[in-house]
Image (cartoon, rainbow, N blue to C red):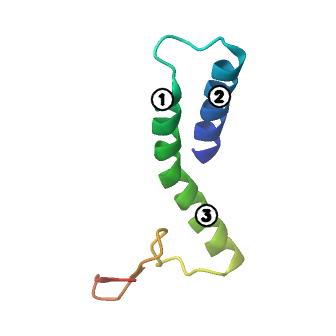
């Protein structure tokens, strides 16, 4: 999912740079695409860290840890 967002953002930037932007594509749409990219990137980072053993699977991808009773701690 993060890869798809990156590809779409790259395409948007290339079209803007090349003067071939589609209707409605502008710097504001770049900003929105960048903001929308953060959640998939954090999820991908979490999966990679769990795979490497640097983070436990129950740790929140945004840095919070869930205790056994379901509370979130930072």
Front residue (pair 53, 13): 13
Residue beneath the point at 61% across and 63% down: 45
Front residue (pair 73, 55): 73
Instruction: Give how far apart the Cα atoms at labels 3 and 2 are.
Output: 24 Å
Mark 2 touching mark 1, by CB under 8 A? Answer: no
Instruction: Give how far apart the Cα atoms at labels 2 and 1 are.
Output: 10 Å
Identify the residue position indicated by label 1 in the image: 29
Which marked residue is nearer to the observer: mark 3 or mark 2? Answer: 2
Mark 3 touching mark 1, by CB under 8 A? Answer: no
Name the side, left or right, on which 9 lies relative to 68: right
Pick the quarter of the image with the C terminus: bottom left
Tag 3's secondary structure?
helix
Identify the residue position indicated by label 2 in the image: 13
Residue beneath the point at 67% across and 72% down: 51
Instruction: Give how far apart the Cα atoms at labels 3 and 1 are.
Output: 24 Å
Front residue (pair 34, 41): 34
Q: Residue furthest bottom?
A: 68
Tag 2's secondary structure?
helix
User: Crowding at label 2, few (<14), some or many (≥20) Cα neighbours within 10 Å?
Assistant: some
Residue 7's image quarter? top right
Identify the residue position indicated by label 3 in the image: 45
Seen in the picture, residue 68 relative to 25 is either above or below; the reply is below
Which marked residue is nearer to the observer: mark 3 or mark 1? Answer: 1
Residue beneath the point at 69% across and 22% down: 17
The tag earlier along the polypeptide, 2 or 1, is: 2
Residue 1: where, in percent of width, then height?
57, 44
Name the side, left or right, on which 63 lies relative to 49: left
The tag earlier along the polypeptide, 3 or 2, is: 2
Residue 12: where, in percent of width, then height?
61, 26
User: Crowding at label 3, few (<14), some or many (≥20) Cα neighbours within 10 Å?
Assistant: some
The tag earlier along the polypeptide, 3 or 1, is: 1
């Amino acid at each position: 999912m993060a890869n798809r967002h990156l590809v779409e953002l790259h395409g948007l930037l290339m079209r803007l740079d090349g003067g071939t932007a589609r209707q409605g594509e502008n710097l504001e749409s770049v900003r929105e695409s960048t903001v929308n990219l953060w959640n998939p990137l954090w999820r991908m980072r979490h999966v990679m860290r769990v795979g490497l053993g640097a983070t436990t699977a129950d740790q929140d991808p945004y840095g919070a840890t869930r205790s056994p009773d379901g509370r979130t701690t930072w």
